[in-house]
Image (cartoon, rainbow, N blue to C red):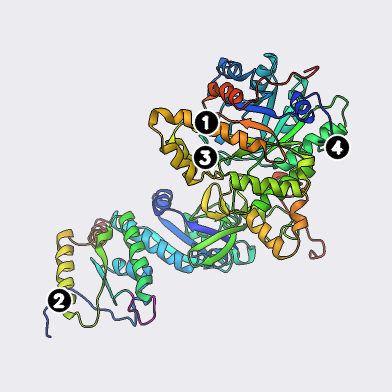
């Protein structure tokens, strides 16, 4: 899932301090799971902003809402009869949802309330780590199910590099060396021949390098 | 034991401090509290294993938020007591009450009252 | 080591003599005289000179320009190239440029992550990795073709090198077969990480010899003399992928401070002597970090002087 973390409160306050009617819009999707942008975080942020405005002697209306998903028009449409009542919105969805909210209500200012970080897993509550960079052409079948593009600091396809130390990445001893993991997994799977074969340069055109991406599924479109 | 402690405190009972969320702490201030004390079981003695530890992290975050919105994090505090520590409970209430008296009323309460007053005055002029 | 190039380094290795290389680090300014000076210090004592490519991700004068300076001095450079900063367009373009100046040796590296350097907020590239860079050079040299498929006439005649680190533990076997992967990609010689753990190096070489890898790739053993016990401790604790056994620290610390530099040189010479007897070692890469002036002494005392003269080089 997409992982995000709350933006510093002072940054959000700085963005919204001159408005009088605010909507804090959460998303019940990915950001709820990593506790950055669901209904609960909406309530916390709204309460904090109300406290801020009240102690500053300002009467500002801070309302709360959370949508099933902000990355879908049908759910965003649920705000259609309310949005005119606000000067600005803070979206606690990921960068995708925040943009789609702004796109749908393009006469309103939408501020991001979270920093969208990566696609990853919940290792445990409050500990999330990256697993995929959406390169657009999955190579997990060749690498023992471990992605070197997302998990090697140098996205090497023929790792490990000479800087990994005791199975850990050179840039941070808390990060396991992806290629050490891949080697061990391939060994377990009896596929070490894959490790010994040089992997050709990758076609990055399906990744970010190819420009903004789009999927068109004619089989699904009417 | 019939211990005396200041009548300024309103007790809200919860089954476990694990029930206390940040939102409850913040709402208490929105409703006009000048300070909030969370009293949980001793660390390691939680009947639900980690309830008091969850409360600890939430109190910490509430403090950070209160600092950033101008109320001051010192208005909320957590203490860990066992059921046999009634005397210490009374002391804590006294200490915290004194601390809040020193800090003065929550700026939210003051500002809200002021806003109401000016609002009313505005109506009169209109 | 199939393809033959005009590289003097390749000729010396092919002749069965022990090769000696060293390296110079470019300055963090536009002062080209620094490179000229460092190269002069070591020129008669080594067969070829590596020029590092923004090592540890610190911005320095570019490796290619420094290699050209060295080439113009009549010496033989080894162009180090990392894939961190340039994509396949820039890398191939630089290879063509280097070849146009008669540079015939390359060391293909992925490069240190920018996290360590003086621009840690920069974007990195890593379009290719070191192995893929070697594949690209081989394709350009042997097929006269770019990665994109374009064919051209005048090919870069590069003797292709790479780095190996037998000590980036825990698995020596994995490191050895990874060298095999580089050899399969076209790498003809490798320079190793600084060797202090002799047992591990021998274990690595045994695996390499047993698997026939030393037939395909010439291993130049990395030697870095210690200046003092402080440097030994720093390398043990702080440098990723470096394996400095406690005995080395003990030995360096066991002599008075003013004698430590000499002890470091003695140690380096002993290491060379010991490695000469290890099957598969084809030469030495002496990295005297900011201590280039000691290279002649080490080469001489290790019995590696004078350097062979090759015809046409």
The residue at which mark 3 appears reads as: C116
The residue at which mark 4 appears reads as: C149
Name which of mark 3 and mark 1 comes first in the sequence: 3
Q: Nearer the viewer, mark 1 or mark 4?
A: 1
Q: Is residue A11 magenta?
A: no
Q: Nearer the viewer, mark 4 or mark 2?
A: 4
Label 2: few (<14), some (14–19) or many (≥20) C-alpha neighbours in 10 Å: few
Q: Are marks 3 and 4 on the same chain?
A: yes
The residue at which mark 2 appears reads as: B7
**A155 or C33, which lies in front?**
C33
Q: Secondary structure at mark 1?
A: helix
Quarter of image, res C71? top right
Q: Nearer the viewer, mark 1 or mark 2?
A: 1
Tell me: residue A104, above or below residue C200. Answer: below
Q: Residue at x 11, y 85 (%)?
A: B2
Q: CA distance from mark 3 to mark 4?
A: 35 Å
The residue at which mark 1 appears reads as: C266
Magenta region, residue range = B44-50
**Pointers 3 and 2 in contact (C-beta within 8 Å):** no
Viewed as shown, does residue C66 lie left or right of B78? right
The numbered disc on residue B61 is: none
Q: Residue at x 75, y 33 (%)?
A: C160
Name which of mark 3 and mark 4 comes first in the sequence: 3
Q: CA distance from mark 1 to mark 2?
A: 82 Å
Q: CA distance from mark 3 to mark 1?
A: 31 Å
Q: Secondary structure at mark 2?
A: loop
Q: Residue at x 31, y 66 (%)?
A: B30
Indicate the chain on which mark 3 is placed: C
């Amino acid at each position: 899932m997409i992982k995000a973390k709350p933006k510093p409160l002072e940054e959000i306050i700085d963005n919204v301090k001159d408005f009088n009617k605010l909507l804090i819009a959460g998303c019940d999707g990915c950001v709820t799971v990593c506790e950055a942008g669901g209904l609960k975080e909406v309530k916390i942020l709204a309460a904090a902003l109300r406290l801020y405005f009240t102690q500053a002697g300002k009467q500002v209306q801070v309302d709360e809402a959370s949508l099933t998903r902000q990355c879908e028009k049908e759910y965003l449409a649920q705000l259609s009869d309310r949005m005119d009542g606000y000067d600005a919105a803070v979206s606690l969805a990921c960068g995708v949802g925040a943009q789609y909210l702004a796109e749908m209500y393009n006469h309103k200012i939408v501020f991001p309330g979270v920093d969208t970080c990566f696609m990853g897993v919940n290792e445990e509550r409050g500990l999330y780590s990256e697993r995929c960079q959406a390169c657009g052409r999955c190579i997990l079948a060749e690498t023992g199910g471990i992605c070197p593009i997302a998990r090697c600091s140098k996205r090497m396809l023929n790792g490990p590099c000479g800087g990994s130390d005791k199975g850990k990445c050179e840039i941070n001893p808390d990060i396991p060396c992806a290629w050490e993991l891949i080697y061990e997994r391939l060994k377990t799977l009896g596929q070490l021949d894959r490790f010994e074969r040089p992997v050709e340069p990758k076609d990055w055109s399906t990744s970010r390098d190819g420009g903004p991406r789009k999927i068109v599924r004619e089989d699904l479109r009417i | 034991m019939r211990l005396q402690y200041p009548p300024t405190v309103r007790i809200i009972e919860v089954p476990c401090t694990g029930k206390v969320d940040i939102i409850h702490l913040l709402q208490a201030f929105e409703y006009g509290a000048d300070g909030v004390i969370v009293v949980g079981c001793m660390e390691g003695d939680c009947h639900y294993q980690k309830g008091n530890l969850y409360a600890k992290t939430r109190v910490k975050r509430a403090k950070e938020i209160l600092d950033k919105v101008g109320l001051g994090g010192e208005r909320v505090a957590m203490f860990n007591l066992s059921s046999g520590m009634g005397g210490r409970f009374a002391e804590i209430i006294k200490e915290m009450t004194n601390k809040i008296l020193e800090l003065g009323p929550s700026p939210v309460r003051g500002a809200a009252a002021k806003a109401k007053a000016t609002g009313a005055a505005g109506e009169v002029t209109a | 080591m199939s393809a033959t190039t005009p590289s003097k380094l390749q000729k010396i290795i092919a002749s069965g003599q022990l090769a000696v290389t060293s390296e110079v680090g470019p300055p963090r300014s536009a002062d080209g005289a620094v490179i000229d000076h460092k190269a002069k210090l070591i020129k008669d004592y080594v067969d070829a000179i590596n020029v590092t490519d923004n090592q540890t991700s610190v911005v320095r004068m570019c490796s290619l320009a420094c290699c050209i300076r060295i080439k113009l001095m009549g010496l033989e450079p080894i162009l180090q190239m990392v894939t961190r900063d340039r994509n396949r367009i820039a890398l191939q373009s630089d290879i063509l440029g280097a070849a146009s100046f008669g540079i015939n040796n390359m060391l293909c590296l992925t490069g240190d992550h920018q996290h360590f350097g003086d621009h840690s907020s920069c974007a990195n590239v890593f379009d290719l990795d070191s192995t893929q860079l070697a594949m690209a050079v081989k394709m350009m040299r042997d097929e006269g073709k770019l990665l994109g498929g374009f064919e051209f006439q005048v090919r870069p005649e590069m003797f292709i090198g790479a780095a190996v680190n037998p000590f980036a533990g825990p698995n020596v076997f994995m490191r050895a077969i990874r060298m095999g992967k580089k050899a399969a990609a076209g790498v003809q010689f490798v320079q190793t990480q600084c060797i202090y753990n002799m047992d591990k190096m021998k274990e690595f070489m045994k695996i390499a010899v047993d698997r026939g890898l030393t037939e395909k790739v010439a291993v130049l053993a990395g030697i870095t003399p210690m200046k003092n016990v402080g440097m030994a401790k720093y390398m043990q604790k702080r440098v990723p992928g470096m394996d400095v056994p406690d005995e080395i620290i003990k030995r360096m610390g066991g002599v008075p401070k003013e004698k430590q530099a000499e002890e470091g040189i003695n140690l380096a010479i002993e290491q060379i002597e010991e490695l000469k007897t290890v099957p598969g070692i084809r030469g030495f890469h002496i990295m005297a970090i900011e201590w280039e002036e000691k290279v002649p002494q080490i080469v001489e005392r290790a019995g590696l002087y004078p350097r062979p003269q090759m015809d046409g080089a």
